[in-house]
Amino acid sequence: MFRFRYFPFFFVLLSFLWVGFADESGPTQPTDMLERAWEEYRFLSLDQAKSYFNQVLSKEEGTSRGLEAKLGLAMIRQYAESGSDLTGAEAMYKEILAAGPETEVADLVRSNLADLHISRGEKDAALALLDQLIEERLHSVIGQDALLRKVVLVMGEFGSEQSVAAAREAEEKLSEVEVSTDRPLLVPILSSLLGDIYFRADVIESAVAHYERYTTIGSAHSTNYASQASQLYRLANIYENTLNQPDKAGHFYRRLATEYSNSQMAYYALEKAILYNAITRDEVRELRLGGVTDEILDELFAVKGERN
Amino acid sequence: MGKSNKDGGAAWVNYVGLFILLVCYAGAFWNVISAKRQESRADVIRLVHWQLELGVRDGLESLIEQFEAYKKEQGQTVEVVQIPIPERAYNQYVTTQLIGGTAPDMIQTGMFPTEYLGRFFHPLSVYLQQPNPFNQARLNELESADNLSEDEQKLKEALSSYADGPWMNAFTDGLRSQYQETFQEYFGVGFSTFTVRMYYNKNLFQKALGHSRPPESYAELLEFAKGIQRYAQESGEEVLPIASSKYQVNVFKHRYMANLTGNLARKFDLDRSGGADGLEKLMAMLRGDFTPWTPEYAAAIDAVQQLAIFFPKGFMALGREDSGFAFVQGKAAMITSGSWDALSYLNNIKNQPADKRFEVGIFDLPVITAEDEQFGEYAVGRSSEAAAGTGFAFGITRYTRHLDLCVEFLQFATTPEKNTELNLIAGWIPVVHGAVPGELMKNFEPNYVGYFGATSFDIMPGGKALLLEDQIYWPFISGDFGYDTYAERLWQALPAEAATDFKRMYESSKESIPNRQLRRSAFLSTMVLGEQSQEARITNEVNLQRSLEPLLKLMINQKKIDHMLAKTLDQTPDDPRVQAFNQAFFRALDRETSN
Amino acid sequence: MAKDISLKQVATYWPLYFFVLPSAMLVATFSYFPAASAIYHSVFRWNGNYIKIFIGTSNFQKSLGTPAYWVITLLLTMTMIYQSQKPTLFAKVTKWICGLGFPLVNLVVLSRLHPPAGLTPAAMLTPALIWVGLWLFFRWRMDVDSEYKGILNFVAVFLGGASILTALGLQEVLAWSLSTFVAGLGVWFLPSRTEKVPMLDGMRISQALAGVGMMVWSLAQNAGGEVALWSGFGVIAALVLANLLKMVPSIVTAVVIHRLKSEASNYWYRVLFVVPMIIPGMVGLLIWKFFFESKGLFNLILRETGIMHLLYLFDAWTENGVFLDKTRAAAMSTSEIMAAASEAAPAWLGNPDLVLPAFIVWGFPWVGVVGVLIYLAGLQSIDNSVYEAADLDGVGAVGKFLNIELPLILTQVRINLVLLIIATLQMYGQVLILFGDGGGPNGRMMVPGLLMYRSAFVEGYAGYACSIGLILFFLILVLTEINNRFVRVEK
């Protein structure tokens, strides 16, 4: 009887063990533990990332990789969506800074510390860190990221004089930066922010300048279709209705219609471009917009004739 | 129990349960073992979708067979398994699989929270910005070939315009609809698109109206419907002008809203982004520019209501299947529905007894044009179908062990020829440039001619204001009360609901910041610490930009809201109705925020 | 029954616990864990996923309004229930204080949230005069020793008083609760000197429950909570009341089957009742939906039986405007109304005024399979000798039912009652399938369960949904407790 009584229990246990060991499913992962940790971090599985970081830290404490792992752990403490531990993170950051104040890791630490101060409401401490980053690293993403955050921090409300002043200051800084369409870094995002600030403060000329900059340098690598297209629409609309410059408006409507010919705005933009003489009939035909027949084109170009 | 033990003879009965248990375990064992064996024999890709329609499954199956054969040629044994899950259980299934870490390789996107995309799916823009090798190879083949058939010539022309460019350019909408703005990423590759048209019963038209041509304008639609109603009364035959249900009412409403309120939306668009978002609509309400008495809105509602008298009684309580059933049985002259129903409608009509079969015509919903006597002055024009986008899309989960194979499968499936074939079997509209829609689907091809934008009283998706508008609309469109009552009731109850939505909007932009900060921190550190090859740096940079843009938007959102509110409150509205709205709104908001 | 075992026995038989383990684990995982999680998350702004911010009682404040009123009411109610059946002086005084507390809280709530409305026109006095008149009439007609005298007095004081107070311009709820209180004074104290008034206990309980109900209703309306939630509870209350009546056919069916002389036909009837259980609920739902359609069977039956005509006449007479347009109905002659009725085809599920009645008619003739089986089980345990004794006494068929069967299956009735109340309060699947998450025409069927579902899965406010769930849970708990205490089963 004894055997039978225990049999099911062992059977269940065994089968669980068997399945557990046999199951190797799971994502393909890089072999390097530190890389693995960052990948988990990017996928926001912080618990997994934490255990990998800890493994690296325990094996390679004191090396640069150890510092990086420590940075990762501190970031998890700081940015975890629930149960973040700012004090703990700050202490770890301080340790990293003490170990190597001139490394890339240290730059990141400063950047994160600025975030930490902002979330605690310590504006001055945050500004000091951001200013340092802007001074030293303006030509790289980390400095431009700092600049972006500084503008947001000091701008106050939209439409206020303070916001315009903040924008002007940032503009000055930004003019020192060489930008190419191949490597725009964060300049497009900054331009878009500055454009918004000016637009809401009714400084239309400056706003338009920044929006234009966004549309010229922003598109190289960005896939942000919605904001690109709507930025073109915005420019065209401002030129058309606020600044009364139909030529310019036509130019941007044309860009909208040709570059985003499969967007919902395309046909509207096309009509406007035709109206403002910005596009020829042959060019329209080349776009091959679904549903745009010769009759429709006849009509569109005829309407233009009437209005002229 | 004790008794039977002593009986001895019945003792074996006690082991029946154990036996069953053993059998079950053995079965489960076998299941696991065979799955493992299969995996060791071949690379298995599992893909999950909710398309249980026969055609779709067959289409996918044929695609899979071809892919497996192709891989075999290359010396790799690949097995692709499709797992259809019913629509009803799809969300739960995907959720448990993703969170449990046991998700299949590819999952049809949609029906689950978009948040999962960022957490559990591989970003695809890296691949989408590279050319699709299958297209390149096919183009080379076509270019080197001599005498091409007409179809091949066309295919070559289409391929030459995008085959060497990014893969995403192959899609009719550039795959824009799979773009997730919150993550600034693509997580899915789509196979089909869908549009909405009207179907009509040609035989019935001939009998009732003396011709079988479709209506060309809104006025004509009304006229034809009236004609059929008259015919039904005179002949005593039980036929309806338009089969309809709540679902179809929303289609009409949506269309005529876009048709008549598009300019209104552009008027409310304070930041000139090309459309009125919830906040801008709310500001328009507070200013008094947008009320239920705004003529454009009233006209759009009226346009649907004039059609509603031709709907069956109690249509709001009917389901989509009910109205479709009425149409295929020949009991209704017209119905509006999507391209996805075309195949099943035709099949159902074919299966009717001979005397009930009829010929089906398809036309686009008539647009209200400037010539329309009633609503012409507000007519904007037809609305563009560019937003139809690409649906039936698959994403690759992070749990896959065959990332490259999955990408290859998606690339294989989205060549013009394969896309044509899949959609021909499924009865859907292809989405790749150069793919040819089936004869039936030609009626449904998306028409890019048209305008954009519409406005109604919804402030946020799934919000309280939207719910309220829907709730009051129901009895109104059913004819329980007139427009005045509808407008009064809506305007009366709207402030409190708008305040809830407003507060939630405010809240949610704040709440999402930590998550975006986390993402940004991830990409910033990858950017700074990661590989420094040119290519890797550009990828990292783009990733960082993508994580930053939505975060920035959230961070300045609050400032934007405050600014807009202050600007709106500068002017006091004259209309007492608007004043009352403002008062009620701010009272409700006080209460919301004091909680 | 459970038996204590010694440690020594445990040492031998401990593996047996593994057989309990799976079910214990399943119950813990799928019942207790979600419940605990709901309690925990109800104090968070939680989107069911990654947003989780502690916000204290905000969720409850949004659904209930000012919490202090609810806490006070809750305490009063609990004291009242606890003290209700004790004869001591302390209990009496406590009850008295509680009774006074209800209208007092009401007064505070109302005066804070709604300024007094002022005197209404004298026409409002009419209902009050009618009630008082009726009361005087009954007093005049009544035999001094009538056992219903107490109830009539109670009803008259209650209704008449409330009407007069409303007419004087008091808020309706306040008027009703004050009136309940005054009527209660009479019920609780005056007759207690002479224990001759029958049904005194029942009257006291109904007075107390009426008071509590009034109070909850008042708070729901006036404490500033979520309007949709409380109108949903209104719908549920109507459905619960209807369902109480719908229990009767099941009981009758069970008794009829039980009394069948032939064992075989008894068996076959039982089988016939069980067979429909294999039909999926979804099919039943679709059949009923079809039935209620404009051209459906229900309208046909109503027209053919002439019930539709009565409904139309009533509608025209009361000027409700449910079937006929109010202004049009006023101008119509009776024959015109009858003509309209004979062609009438209202959409029962599409009309905000008809959808609730349709839900009440739903499932006619309301013979619930499970209910019948439970009653049958109860009936079968009645010993034959009881019937024989009744036969000797010459008790008739109805008498047997009232004096033997009904009292003896009261346990089952009570179980069914509890299950029914719970099921009704939790009901929302039917509405969701029929109408989607908008709650049907004009949102009329937005029941609390549906609101909970919507908040969590459509709006992404899962924490708020948890708080609604807890309110539901609490309400069920209170109702079950009341049921257990006051629906007495005396064998």
Image (spheres, coloured by chain):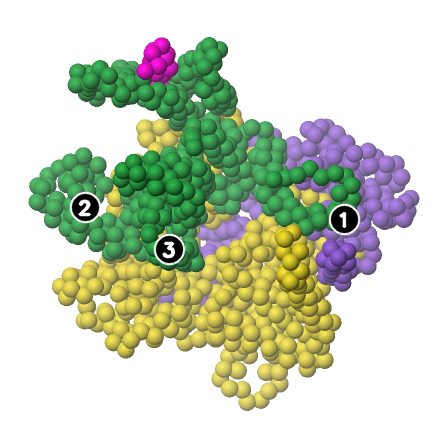
Chain colours: A purple, B yellow, C green
Residue C35 visible within the image:
yes
Pick the quarter of the image with the N terminus of chain C: top right
Q: Are marks 2 and 1 on the same chain?
A: no
Residues marked 3 and 1 touching at CB (< 8 Å)? no
Q: Which residue is mark 1?
A: A49
The three-letter code of the residue at mark 2 reads Ile
Report crowding for label 2: few under 14, some 14 to 19, many 20 or more residues within 10 A (C-alpha). some
Secondary element at image label 2 = helix
Please state which of the two labelled residues, at mark 3 or mark 2, is closer to the viewer: 3
Q: Which residue is mark 2?
A: C307
Residue at 15% x, 61% y is B233
Position of residue A195 measured from the top left corner of the image (x, y, whole percent): 58, 42
Q: Is residue C430 left or right of C261 when viewed as pictured?
A: right
Which numbered dot is residue C263? 3
Q: Which residues are magenta?
A: C176-196
CA separation in Å, label 2 and label 1: 71 Å
